[in-house]
Image (cartoon, rainbow, N blue to C red):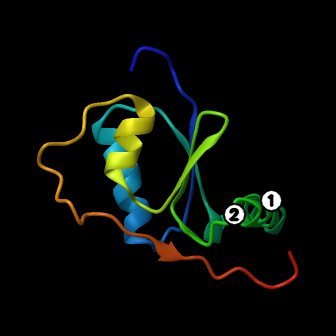
Amino acid sequence: MAEQIKVELYTQSTCPWSRNARAWLDNHHVPYEFVDYDLADEGLQRHIQEEMVARGASAFPFVKIGDADFIIGYNPDAFARLLGLPKDADQAAGDAGACDAEFEAGV
């Protein structure tokens, strides 16, 4: 990665796809910040929910890459493409997924 791209994740502590996203970034030495939505305080949950709903996202992980790009769910091919990294040769084609977000009404 020639230039440092800011990466932020909204995850759920119980979501295996969220854990896979973090592991993928760790294995590729990509620095990132993350928040487990289900463990965050109410104010931060509201902020995350508003941001995700505004972008049409209703699943975790929600991965923000740079200022404009985002990925809904675990998608290693998209992570690599947006981060300028080579695609994993051993990555199974169907190895992607997401956990549904169960937001409360009112946002």
Q: Quadrant of the C terminus?
A: bottom right
Return the x and y of residue 47 as percentages of the image width and height.
80, 59
SS type, badge 2? loop
At 81% from the left and 85% from the top, the residue drawn is 105
Q: Quadrant of residue 38?
A: bottom right
Q: Nearer the viewer, mark 1 or mark 2?
A: 1
Q: Which mark is residue 40?
A: 2
Which quadrant of the structure image shows residue 1?
top left
Q: Are marks 1 and 2 in contact (CB under 8 Å)?
A: no
Q: Position of residue 2 (x, y in %)?
A: 42, 14
> How far apart in space, not on screen, are marks 1 and 2 (Cα)?
10 Å
Image point (81%, 66%), residue name? 46
Q: Nearer the viewer, residue 35 or 70?
A: 70
- Is residue 81 left or right of 31 when viewed as pictured? left
Q: Amino acid at mark 2?
A: Ala
Q: Nearer the viewer, residue 67 or 48?
A: 67
Q: Residue furthest left?
A: 90
Image spot of residue 10 (x, y percent): 59, 57
Few, some or many residues within 10 Å of mark 2 (<14, 14–19, 20+) = few
At 70% across and 62% down in the image, what residue appears?
Answer: 52
- Does residue 12 sit above or below 33 in this rendering? below
Q: Residue furthest top?
A: 2
Dot placed on the residue nearer the N-terminal end, 1 or 2: 2
Query: Closer to the camera, 47 or 84?
Result: 84
The correct choice, above or below, for 58 with respect to 35 in the image is below
| Identity, as a three-letter code, of the amino acid under mark 1 | His
**Which residue is denoted by mark 1 in the rendering?**
47
Side of 36 where 103 appears, left or right: right
Residue 68: percent from the left, percent from the top?
65, 39
**SS for dot 1:** helix
